[in-house]
Image (tube, rainbow, N blue to C red):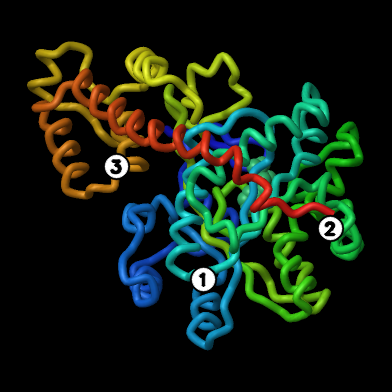
């Protein structure tokens, strides 16, 4: 029997059953009809959609209805700065960049430094500020359009955000927050208020531009509880409910759950600033393998790509469908050994990181083009 799993904004663990999660959260599966509808606008489909890495949504059909009526949406996503960026974090951002390009939309990128300060006992506000600006380099490195992308730290943009957060928070009861996030009497009172801050960007452009603008939030599925609350509140304040499109997690090197940045000994995690030799070492040493115990046995019985971490990483980082299929087949039949699969994966990830790290250095002089502050 599968181990039980947990998915909340503060904890992701166990073997996640995404179909059960869809039911539990009350979100919609992305089906082929929806994919066709998206494709009508975008001409091609990002491989994250084809491979169901983005697998669920709320109100995507409404977003497309509005778009077809020339009522264009904006994108909103975020990153709470608790440490260096790792490969798991950038999955939704890569997809967000694709959406920005295809729909030519604005993107509002929230950096809730307040969130990590409140929820992590060991982080000071100086730490969260430091990581915020490190993470922003990774965001900019992915190629978002400077003219259409706004990045802001909650503590630096508080004067604009706070009155909106107040209006939102007045509509959320303590019992809702307790029930949705499992907060306990011993949690600090900042954690109770925080979800109001995460709701703000879903209506911020509408408020600043004084017209109701549809909002689409690409995010990893663990954030859904926040936006479920936003969707309850916004109509009560006269704004649209935000829509969302949601992805699964990049698994940690050693197996189930999600990659975690708090894991600083980091045998589970590949950071974006990692050296190529370190990436190679980690994959060799830690990546959970779907191979057989001996080469002989592997050649006879074949490996299991479904549980193999390298194969899963390739499905997130190798966009060539034909190559991926061939790797699947060769590994499954035993023609490809685990060591070979690990070598390919190391190459693919290091290629990605080489480009990313170059762009990250360039990003240092670009930051001010993106920032919003009071
Ligand atoms: N809470 C998110 C995190 O822990 C950060 C975040 C803020 C976010 N706003 C968002 C994520 C909107 C996705 C979409 O990283």
Give the quarter of the image for residue 309. top left
Q: Is residue 151 left or right of residue 351?
A: right
Secondary structure type for disc 1: helix
Sequence-wise first label, 3 or 1: 1
Residue 318's disc number:
3
Residue at 48% x, 59% y is 56
Q: Are marks 3 and 1 in contact (CB under 8 Å)?
A: no
Q: Earlier in the sequence, mark 1 or mark 2?
A: 1
Which residue occupies the extreme front position in the image? 365
Secondary structure at numbered mark 3: loop
Closer to us: mark 1 or mark 2? Answer: 2
Is 31 displayed left or right of 166 in the figure? left
Residue 47 x %, y % = 33, 54
Q: Which mark is residue 136?
A: none
- In three-dimensional space, the C-alpha distance between marks 3 and 1, rounded to whole angstroms, equals 26 Å
Q: Which residue is mark 1?
A: 60
Q: Indicate the position of residue 233 as horizontal and vertical percent values.
A: 78, 68
Q: Which of the 4 image quarters holds residue 10? A: top right
- Residue at position x 52%, y 60% in the image: 245
Q: Is residue 9 visible?
A: no
Nearer to us: label 3 or label 1:
3
Give the residue at mark 2. 161
285 or 372, which is in the foreground? 372
Q: Foreground: 190 or 207?
A: 207
């Amino acid at each position: 029997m599968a181990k039980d799993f947990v998915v909340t904004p503060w904890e992701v663990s166990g073997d996640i059953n995404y179909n059960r999660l869809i039911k539990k959260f009350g979100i919609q599966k992305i089906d082929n009809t929806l994919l066709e509808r998206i494709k009508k606008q975008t001409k091609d489909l990002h491989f994250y959609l084809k491979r169901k890495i983005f697998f669920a949504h709320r109100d995507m059909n409404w977003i497309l209805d509005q778009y077809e009526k020339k009522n264009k949406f904006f994108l909103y996503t975020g990153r709470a700065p608790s440490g260096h960026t790792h490969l798991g974090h950038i999955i939704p951002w890569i997809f967000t960049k694709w959406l920005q390009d295809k729909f030519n939309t604005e993107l509002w990128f929230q950096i809730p430094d307040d969130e990590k300060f409140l929820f992590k006992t060991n982080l000071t506000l100086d730490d969260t500020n430091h990581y915020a600006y490190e993470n922003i380099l990774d965001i900019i490195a992915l190629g978002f359009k400077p003219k259409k992308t706004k990045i802001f730290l909650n503590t630096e943009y508080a004067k604009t955000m706070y009155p909106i957060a107040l209006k939102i928070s007045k509509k959320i009861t303590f019992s809702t927050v307790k029930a949705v996030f499992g907060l306990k009497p011993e949690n600090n009172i900042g954690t109770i208020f925080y979800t109001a801050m995460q709701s703000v960007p879903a209506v911020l452009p509408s408020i600043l531009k004084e017209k109701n603008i549809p909002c689409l939030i690409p995010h990893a599925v663990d954030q859904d509880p926040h936006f479920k609350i936003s969707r309850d509140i916004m109509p009560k304040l006269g704004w649209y409910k935000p829509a969302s499109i949601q992805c699964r997690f990049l698994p940690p090197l050693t197996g189930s759950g999600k990659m975690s940045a708090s894991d600083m000994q980091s045998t589970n995690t590949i950071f974006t600033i990692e050296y190529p030799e370190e990436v190679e070492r980690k994959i060799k040493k830690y990546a959970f393998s779907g191979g057989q115990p001996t080469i002989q046995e592997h050649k006879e019985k074949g490996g299991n790509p479904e549980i193999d971490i390298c194969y899963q990483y390739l499905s997130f980082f190798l966009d060539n469908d034909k190559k991926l299929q061939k790797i699947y087949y060769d590994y499954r039949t035993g023609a490809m050994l685990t060591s070979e699969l690990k070598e390919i994966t190391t190459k693919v990830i290091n290629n990605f990181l080489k480009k990313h790290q170059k762009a990250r250095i360039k990003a240092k002089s670009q930051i001010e083009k993106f920032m919003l502050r009071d």
